Image (spheres, rainbow, N blue to C red):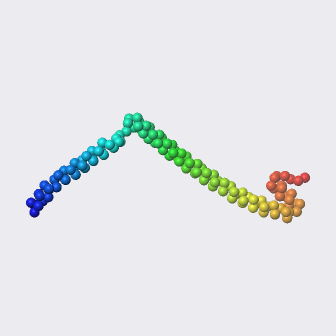
């Protein structure tokens, strides 16, 4: 069996060497024809500058987002205050409406007494 293997290798040695040589030449061709991927110093400086600008913009964006959150909180507080004032206004409107309806049923003496108590005015 070893004899068969050595015979096959010796018969095909020329083909194997040519195939191996072809692949070595093909590898060298692609190795030397591909462009270099290294950056020049100027390009590296530009990239570093761009990275610094991106970092500055990122920091500014974070500050802006914090400001927006603060404004949103203030808007929420103001909205709550406005809602509270609206509710108080509705309650006061109901009280005055009831008072006006009550006053329409007063006679002259009750009206004089009402204004005297309310504004400190006494009729003569």
* 16 to the left or right of 3: right
The quadrant in which residue 49 appears is: top left
x then y, percent, for residue 61? 51, 45
Rendered residue at 56%/48% (across/down): 68
The quadrant in which residue 110 appears is: bottom right
x then y, percent, for residue 101? 81, 63
Q: Considering the image in quadrants, where does the N terminus appear?
A: bottom left
Vertical position of residue 51 compared to residue 100: above or below? above
Rendered residue at 78%/61% (across/down): 97
x then y, percent, for residue 9? 14, 56
Q: Nearer the viewer, residue 116 or 95?
A: 95
Rendered residue at 83%/55% (across/down): 116
Which residue is situated farthest in the left direction here?
3
Q: Nearer the viewer, residue 121 or 52?
A: 52
Rendered residue at 13%/55% (across/down): 10
Which residue is situated farthest in the right direction here?
124
Q: Nearer the viewer, residue 36 or 25?
A: 25
* 3 to the left or right of 119: left
Which residue is situated farthest in the bottom direction here?
105
Q: State how many labels appear.
A: 0
Q: Nearer the viewer, residue 109 or 24?
A: 24
x then y, percent, for residue 17? 19, 50
* 112 to the left or right of 83: right
């Amino acid at each position: 069996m070893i004899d068969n293997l050595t015979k096959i290798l010796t018969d095909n040695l020329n083909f194997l060497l040519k195939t191996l040589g072809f692949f070595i030449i093909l590898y060298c061709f692609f190795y030397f024809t591909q462009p270099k991927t290294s950056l020049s110093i100027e390009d590296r400086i530009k990239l570093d500058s761009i990275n610094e600008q991106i970092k500055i913009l990122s920091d500014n964006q974070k500050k802006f987002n914090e400001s927006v959150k603060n404004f949103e909180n203030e808007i929420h507080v103001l909205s709550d205050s406005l809602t509270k004032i609206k509710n108080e206004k509705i309650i006061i409107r109901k009280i005055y409406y009831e008072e006006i309806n009550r006053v329409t049923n007063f006679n002259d003496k009750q009206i004089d007494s009402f204004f005297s108590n309310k504004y400190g005015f006494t009729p003569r």
